[in-house]
Image (cartoon, coloured by chain):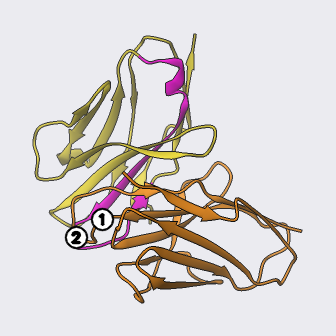
């Protein structure tokens, strides 16, 4: 069974607007960590932002923020004031505390239109 | 800061051939990972290692062997390349198996089997 699901295959938005990418996860653990990564056209994968399950406050880094809805097992990535260089594939991932594996979603391709 | 190096960048093999991919990191991270990414798909875990000489199978370990002889290096062997196989193999590392950290990725090795 898929532990991390990203239902949006691709999204297009106009530059300088806000976009939200969805991600839902499955876990029986009470403690886990959620991550978002960005893969550029060159193939490079970079870490963007993380949410720890025990934290109620949504994480924010630069123009990235998270919408963590624990009862819905959902961790949305919000990008505000999108730029052309935000065009990439975005992956959601989860790691359960005490385990070393990361589970990745299949990714959402974002295109920012000038 | 640090860097993850993967060699070779491109690997062309023949059906049935044994192929080895190498990964080096200078972060001094404990845990290292090998993932496979097929075109348009997410990342699937092949093997990971939480310390030197440790090996843990991921969901996709069949058809692969791994080796962690030093803390800084992690090798992956495709035991018998499949005809027309085409994928990117990504190496990653993280600081500690139990830590609330993230993964850092290498640039990938692109495999093509003729």
Q: Secondary structure at mark 2?
A: loop
- Residue B60, given in percent of the width and then of the height, sits at 56, 75
Q: Position of residue B1 (x, y in %)?
A: 36, 51
| Picture mark count | 2
- The circle on residue B98 is 2
Q: From the image, which quarter does the C terminus of chain B lie in?
A: bottom right
The chain letter for the residue carrying disc 1 is B
Q: Nearer the viewer, residue A112 or B90?
A: B90
Depicted B50 relative to depicted B6: above or below? below
State yes or no: residue A92 in magenta. Answer: yes
Q: Residues within 10 Å of mark 2 (few under 14, many from 20)?
A: some
Chain for colour orange: B
Please identify which colour was used for chain A in the image. yellow
Which of label 1 and label 2 is nearer to you? 1
* Residue in front for this viewpoint, A62 or B7: B7
Q: CA distance from mark 1 to mark 2?
A: 9 Å
The magenta segment is: A82-104
Where residue A113 sits: x, y (%)?
58, 14
Is residue A105 positioned above or below B81 on the image? above
Which residue shows up at 40% across the image and 78% down it? B71
Q: Is residue A33 left or right of residue A79?
A: left
> Residue lying farthest bottom?
B53
Residue drawn 42% across the image and 64% down it: B26
Q: Quadrant of residue B27?
A: bottom left
Q: Residue at x 33, y 57 (%)?
A: A94
Label 1, on which residue?
B95
């Amino acid at each position: 069974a898929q532990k991390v699901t990203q239902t949006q295959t691709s999204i297009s938005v106009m530059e300088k607007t806000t976009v939200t990418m969805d991600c839902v996860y499955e876990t029986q653990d009470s403690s886990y960590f959620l991550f978002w990564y960005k893969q550029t056209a060159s193939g490079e994968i970079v870490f963007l932002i993380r949410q720890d399950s025990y934290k109620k406050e949504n994480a924010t880094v630069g123009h990235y923020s998270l919408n963590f809805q624990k009862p819905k097992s959902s961790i949305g990535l919000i990008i505000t004031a999108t730029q052309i260089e935000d065009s990439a594939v975005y992956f959601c991932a989860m790691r359960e505390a005490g385990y070393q594996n990361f589970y990745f979603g299949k990714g959402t391709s974002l295109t920012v239109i000038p | 800061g640090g860097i993850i190096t993967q060699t070779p960048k491109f690997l062309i093999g023949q059906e049935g051939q044994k192929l080895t991919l190498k990964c080096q990191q200078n972060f001094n991270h404990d845990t290292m990972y090998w993932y496979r990414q097929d075109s348009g798909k997410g990342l699937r875990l092949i093997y990971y290692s939480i310390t030197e000489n440790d090996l843990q199978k991921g969901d996709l370990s069949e058809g692969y062997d791994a080796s962690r002889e030093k803390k800084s290096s992690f090798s992956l062997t495709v035991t018998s390349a499949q005809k027309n196989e085409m994928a990117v193999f990504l190496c990653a590392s993280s600081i500690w198996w139990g830590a609330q950290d993230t993964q850092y990725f290498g640039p990938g090795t692109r495999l093509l089997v003729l």
